[in-house]
Structure formats: C-alpha cells, structure tokens
Image (spheres, helix red, strand yellow):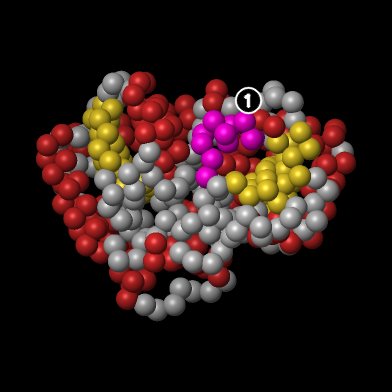
C-alpha cells in the first residue's frame, strides 16, 4: 500500500504524524510525507532517517487557517496533484481540510484535528465576526469535508463540533490519537513540580490561569511564545510575567521527556482542546493530571484525572494544593492516568485503526469498480 500524508510542522499535528507515519512504515506501508507551514529543523526530522519506506518533501506553504493564505492554498493544491501524479498513491491521508477538494480518483481521508470556528466559539464565547477571511475559511473547510471519502476526528466532541458548524458528513468516525509509551519515563523520581505545556500565544490553551494563582509549589510552563502567523504577533508573554512561574520557550523532545519525568503534576488549563497530546505524554510519564472541566477532556480522561471548575483559577489552585500535600492521592491519580493512557491511547491502536479504515475504503473502491 502507498499512502500520501500531508501534515504541518507548527503544532501537535507534527507529533501525531510522527506516530502515524512510523507505525505505517513498520507495517510495510510506503509513505510519501508532505509537510506545510514552515521548514522543520534537522533535529525535528531525524526520526525519518530510520524509515526507509518513507519519502519526505518539506514545503513552506501557508496553512489554511493563516491570514493571506489564499495563493498558498491554490499553489500547494497544484503541488500535491503533481506529487500524486508522480508517485501514484493508493490513499490520501490529509491533515488539512482544504485538500479534500483535490480533483483525484485516489480515496481521501480528511482528519479534523481542530478548526478556527469551534476554537473561536469555545475561546471567545461567541460566533466569529463576519469577514472576508472567515468566509473563505468556512468555505474551504466545508468543501474539503464534502470532498472526503471519510472524515476522522480525535474525539467525539470534536466530531460533534464539526457537524454543528459545517453540517452532516457522508461518513465519519472517531480515531483517538496515540503515543508510544516507550518514549517516556514513568519511573523517574518525582519532584515537587507542576508542569503545563502549550502555545503561550493561544487563548485556547489558557495558561494565563497559572499566572493568577499563588501555587504551593514550583510551576513551569513550556511552549512557543510567538504566533506562527507573523501578521498576528505582538504583545503577549514575557519571561518576567510572573515571579512564581518559570517560562520556557519551545523545548526539544528530549527536554520535554525529562521535564515530564520529573514533574509530579501536569495541568491541562485549556478551554479548547479537541484531544491534547501533551497531556497524554504527561500521563505516560506518570504525572497526576489536573484538568479544566470541559467536555472533550471528560471524554478523554474519564475518572483518571482530577477536574477543576471550568476556567476557574481558584479551583485550579485548590487542586494543586491538595495534590501537593497528599502524596498518596497524587500517586493514585498518576497511576490511573498512566494506565488509561497505555490501555486506550497507544500509537499501535491508532495506527491499526487507520490501517483498517484504509483497507475498508480500498475494498469499497474495488467492489464498486
């Protein structure tokens, strides 16, 4: 089987793609990987060196949610059609909505990781303002979803949001994201350390809640501080924002692994989180999870996390204090999170589910021929 995968290099989709592509290659699938958004550093692509059945083509085309991306979307679609014509894949696995409109006979799976409309509704608490850009974005997403043979979302909540904002879908399903537990160290000695990871410019991550409390222990926030769209940069965070918080810029994969290994508590402060790979990584590192009480995270973590009142800094502080003072409780929730992560959200389960989907779509094409 030959699968063309599109991805972006800015957010968690790149991590998701690594797990997917690695799993596909190890199952004998030939993969053409095309990345968009920005050219990744050599450090971020080293994992591809060991995958001989994967061909990688990085590009710097703007992503569909970026301002002034119209020309890039048109040019990147033409580029992808050239790659399809050259490489002859059996399946397209598209991690952007807009490429669902590609005029090709190759079956298209579109993955709805997140979208700007549901982000705006859940972060701003209102409908997006009317504008030419939002109109183009809505149209691109709607048409891309309609052009896909199958739409996948990483949670039932996210799939419901897509249906609410863009209408019913022909065929859709949930495949939860997964991570390999072998990449994390759950048995390191834990320190009195609270960690949260996320894009500091993203109001959906709501890391500002941690600036509003006086925590009983050390807190570290790690993540990119600059918006990837240069036209939207300005203001925001600085390292001197709060005395009790250690702010770190984007960390390497190894630095994140060590940070999670040392941390006793991981905070999911997000008010918009369709899945949340960082929380999964923390759970696999045996961190106790303190999570904002929003529907998507209740779906993902069930009884394996402690939830603070939605968007309430005071409630967050109380739970951090409770866990910091009660080692038995903290260890219990750390074990629950780790067990749930290993049993439900493994990369093997995710890849097998995608393999089954590809087989179903290809079989349907054969029967219909």
Q: Is residue 281 left or right of residue 363?
A: right
The quarter of the image holding the N terminus is top left
Q: Residue at x 74, y 36 (%)?
A: 264
Q: Nearer the viewer, residue 61 or 12?
A: 61
Q: Residue furthest right?
A: 325
Q: Is residue 161 left or right of residue 91?
A: right
Q: Residue at x 80, y 51 (%)?
A: 215
The residue pinned by badge 1 equals 185
Residue 339 part of the magenta-drawn span: no
Q: Nearer the viewer, residue 9 or 107?
A: 9
Count every numbered label the image shows and give the total: 1
Q: Residue furthest bottom?
A: 130
Q: Is residue 252 left or right of residue 63?
A: right
Determine crowd level at label 1: few under 14, some 14-19, many 20+ residues with C-alpha closer than 10 A: some
Q: Residue furthest front?
A: 240
Residue 40 in sight from this viewpoint: yes
Q: Residue at x 62, y 55 (%)?
A: 239
Vertical side of 99 occupied by 90: above or below: above
SS class, disc 1: loop
Residue 32 image point, x, y percent: 25, 34
Residue 289 image point, x, y percent: 70, 42
Residue 268 image point, x, y percent: 65, 49
Q: Residue at x 39, y 60 (%)?
A: 229
Highlighted magenta segment, given as a residue range: 250-260
- In the figure, residue 337 lies in which quadrant? top right
Q: Nearer the viewer, residue 204 or 300?
A: 204
């Amino acid at each position: 089987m030959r699968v063309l995968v599109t991805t972006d290099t800015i957010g968690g989709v790149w991590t998701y793609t690594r797990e997917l592509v690695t799993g596909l290659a190890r199952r004998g699938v030939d993969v053409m990987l095309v990345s968009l958004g920005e050219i990744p550093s050599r450090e971020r692509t080293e994992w591809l060196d060991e995958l001989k059945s994967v061909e990688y083509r990085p590009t710097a085309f703007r992503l569909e949610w970026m301002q002034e991306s119209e020309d890039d979307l048109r040019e990147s679609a033409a580029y992808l059609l050239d790659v399809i014509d050259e490489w002859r894949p059996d399946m397209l696995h598209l991690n952007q909505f807009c490429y669902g409109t590609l005029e090709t006979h190759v079956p298209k799976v579109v993955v709805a990781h997140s979208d700007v409309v549901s982000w705006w509704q859940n972060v701003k608490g209102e409908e997006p303002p009317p504008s030419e850009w939002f109109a183009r974005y809505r149209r691109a997403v709607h048409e891309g979803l309609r052009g896909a043979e199958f739409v996948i979302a990483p949670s039932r909540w996210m799939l419901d949001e897509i249906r609410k904002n863009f209408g019913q879908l022909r065929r859709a399903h949930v495949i939860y994201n997964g991570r390999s537990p072998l990449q994390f160290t759950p048995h390191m000695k834990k320190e009195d350390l609270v960690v949260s990871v996320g894009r500091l410019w993203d109001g959906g991550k709501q890391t500002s809640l941690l600036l509003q409390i006086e925590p009983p222990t050390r807190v570290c926030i790690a993540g990119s501080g600059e918006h990837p769209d240069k036209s939207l940069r300005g203001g925001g965070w600085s390292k001197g924002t709060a005395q009790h918080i250690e702010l770190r810029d984007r960390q390497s994969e190894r630095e994140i692994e060590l940070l999670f290994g040392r941390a006793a508590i991981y905070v999911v402060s997000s008010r918009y989180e369709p899945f949340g790979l960082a929380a999964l990584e923390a759970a696999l590192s045996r961190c106790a999870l303190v999570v904002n009480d929003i529907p998507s995270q209740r779906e993902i973590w069930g009884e394996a996390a402690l939830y603070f009142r939605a968007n309430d800094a005071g409630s967050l502080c109380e739970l951090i204090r409770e866990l910091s003072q009660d080692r038995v409780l903290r260890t219990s929730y750390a074990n629950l999170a780790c067990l749930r992560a290993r049993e439900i959200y493994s990369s093997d389960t995710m890849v097998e589910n995608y393999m089954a989907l590809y087989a179903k779509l290809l079989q349907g094409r054969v029967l219909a021929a």
